[in-house]
Image (cartoon, rainbow, N blue to C red):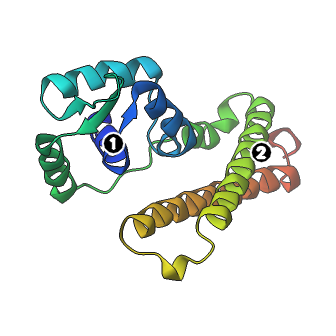
């Protein structure tokens, strides 16, 4: 996925300035696709040049999706997507922990576990606040909710897996004692 497509999705939901898009990325889309303020502005410039977005009549600060942009977004959404392979440096570190500083890795994994627990709590809060009755959702709201559910499930995965790894190394005999 290109940043352009993430921006098209966000702008399809509501026109916005670059600063507002940055805030949206920090608060929602950024949980799944990150971008800096500078990247967003640079890509918006390209998208405007390509005719995918245009400035709206609010002093020229906000962008809206054009018909060409909507067509590109529809094309991209309909395009087959390969399953995403897990690419995780922490997984490689966990596998190779016997060859390095395991204590430092375990400290880092505890820190990561704490971050995943916090993120899971945030996603639960957002789901309860924004979607109190998921059965009543349709169309766009249902899509947003289901992506949030995906985030919750990913955080549950990380919490369970990191906890299992940390617990195993809390109770397992060390290499030196064998």
The residue indicated by pointer 2 is 114
- Hey, which quadrant is residue 125 in on the image? bottom right
Q: Does 118 appear above or below 123? A: above
| Mark 1 and mark 2: Cα distance apart in space | 33 Å
The furthest residue to the bottom: 135
Image mark for residue 94: none
**In front of the other: 149 or 86:** 149
Q: Which residue is mark 1?
A: 11
Q: Residue at x 17, y 35 (%)?
A: 52
For label 1, count other residues whose C-alpha is less than 10 Å away and answer few (under 14), some (14-19) or many (20+): many
169 relative to 61 in the view: left or right:
right
Q: Is residue 162 visible?
A: no
Quarter occupied by the N terminus = top left
Marks 1 and 2 close (CB-CB < 8 Å): no
Horizontally, residue 131 falls left or right of residue 70, namely: right
Quarter of image, res 167:
bottom right
Q: At 80% across and 35% down in the image, what residue appears?
A: 107
Residue 34 location, x and y as percent?
46, 34
Determine the secondary structure under disc 2: helix
Q: Picture coordinates of residue 161 (x, y %)? A: 66, 57
Label 1 vs 2, first from the N-terminus:
1
| Label 2 neighbour load within 10 Å: few <14, some 14-19, many 20+ | some
x, y (%) of residue 174? 84, 44
């Amino acid at each position: 996925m290109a940043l352009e497509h993430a921006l098209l999705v966000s702008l399809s939901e509501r026109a916005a300035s670059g600063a507002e898009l940055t805030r949206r990325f920090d608060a929602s889309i950024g949980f799944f696709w990150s971008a800096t303020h500078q990247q967003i502005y640079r890509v918006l410039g390209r998208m405007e040049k390509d005719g995918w977005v245009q400035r709206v009549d609010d002093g020229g600060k906000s962008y809206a999706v054009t018909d060409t942009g909507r067509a590109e977004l529809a094309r991209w959404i309909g395009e087959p997507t390969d399953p995403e392979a897990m690419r995780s440096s922490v997984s490689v570190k966990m596998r190779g922990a016997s060859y390095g500083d395991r204590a430092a890795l375990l400290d880092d994994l505890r820190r990561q576990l704490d971050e995943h627990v916090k993120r899971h709590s945030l996603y639960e809060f957002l789901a309860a606040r924004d979607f109190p009755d998921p059965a009543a959702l349709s169309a766009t709201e249902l899509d947003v909710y289901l992506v949030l559910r995906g985030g919750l499930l990913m955080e549950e995965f990380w919490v369970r897996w990191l906890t299992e790894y940390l617990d195993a190394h809390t109770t397992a005999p060390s290499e030196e004692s064998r």
